[in-house]
Amino acid sequence: MVSTKITEVFSSIQGEGIYVGQPQIFVRFVECNLSCDFCDTTKKRGKEYSVFELLDLINTINAPHAINSVSITGGEPLLYTDFLKPFLAQLKKRHFKTYLETNGTLPAALDAILDSVDIIAMDMKMPSAQKKGKAFWTEHREFLNLAKKKKVFVKAVVTNKTTKEEIKKAVAIIDDCGYDIPLVLQPVTPANRIKRKVPLSKLFEFQKLAKTVLSEVIIIPQIHKILGVK
């Protein structure tokens, strides 16, 4: 039976995006293929789980059976499609809704597990927050064209380095895939290499710019950080 390393499994509320405040069980995978300036994920070695060991842990955490949504997060969970295929299938059998949190750079991996996902929270990574300014616009466009077959929204973390040109590029990609796909502008929470908050004036400027094209553009900070929960 296939197994993989998981950093942590816990219950909390969703702290980001348009489903903020909803109770979920979080399954955090270890590795990521990117290195974002604002990454706040603790680097841990993780513990090895088989599919059914992980399902047993989820059942234990969800003993009152009050939560029906599982967030697959990381790290980058799409690095683990061999594990996700049987794991997501088992979650479906148990009537869980599956919520994928992803950096949106691995379209082929998404295609491999798309049928088993209900909701996709797709990050669009700005080059200004990546080492050496690496851009992923081509990958993001291909990814979103697949993701739009499901319920999907796009999240863009805004830092003090984020430019109008980056927001315009992100908006153009979303518009090409479906102008009614929601865009969440998330002001960065200072962490790692990020030391300063983003001025509200910059967030409002970017929102106004994006709203000239897209139907839904929302500013939502990391609510779980504000509340002091995971």
Image: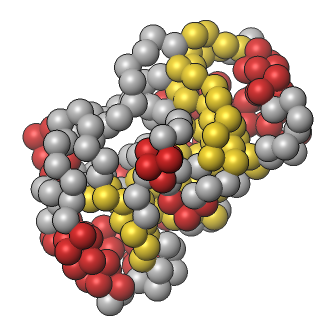
Q: Nearer the viewer, residue 121 or 190?
A: 190
The answer to whether residue 148 is visible is: yes
Q: Residue at x 38, y 20 (%)?
A: 43
Position of residue 165 in the picture relative to residue 68 (left or right): left
Way the structure is coloured: secondary structure
| Quadrant in the rendering for residue 165 | bottom left
Position of residue 153 in the picture relative to residue 201 (left or right): right
Residue 33 placement (x, y as % from top left): 35, 32
- When the figure is inspected, residue 79 is found, relative to residue 224, above or below; the finding is above
Residue 61 placement (x, y as % from top left): 77, 27
- When the figure is inspected, residue 55 is found, relative to residue 89, above or below; the finding is above
Position of residue 95 in the picture relative to residue 196 (left or right): right
Q: Residue at x 88, y 38 (%)?
A: 65
The answer to whether residue 114 is visible is: no
| Quadrant in the rendering for residue 54 | top right
- When the figure is inspected, residue 2 is found, relative to residue 178, above or below; the finding is above
Count of residue discs = 0
Q: Residue at x 48, y 41 (%)?
A: 228
Query: In which quadrant of the rendered image does the N terminus lie?
Result: top right
Q: Nearer the viewer, residue 109 or 182?
A: 182
Q: Residue furthest bottom?
A: 212
Residue 8 placement (x, y as % from top left): 57, 22
Position of residue 211 in the picture relative to residue 59 (left or right): left
Q: Nearer the viewer, residue 173 or 212?
A: 212
Residue 151 placement (x, y as % from top left): 63, 64
Q: Residue at x 19, y 71 (%)?
A: 202
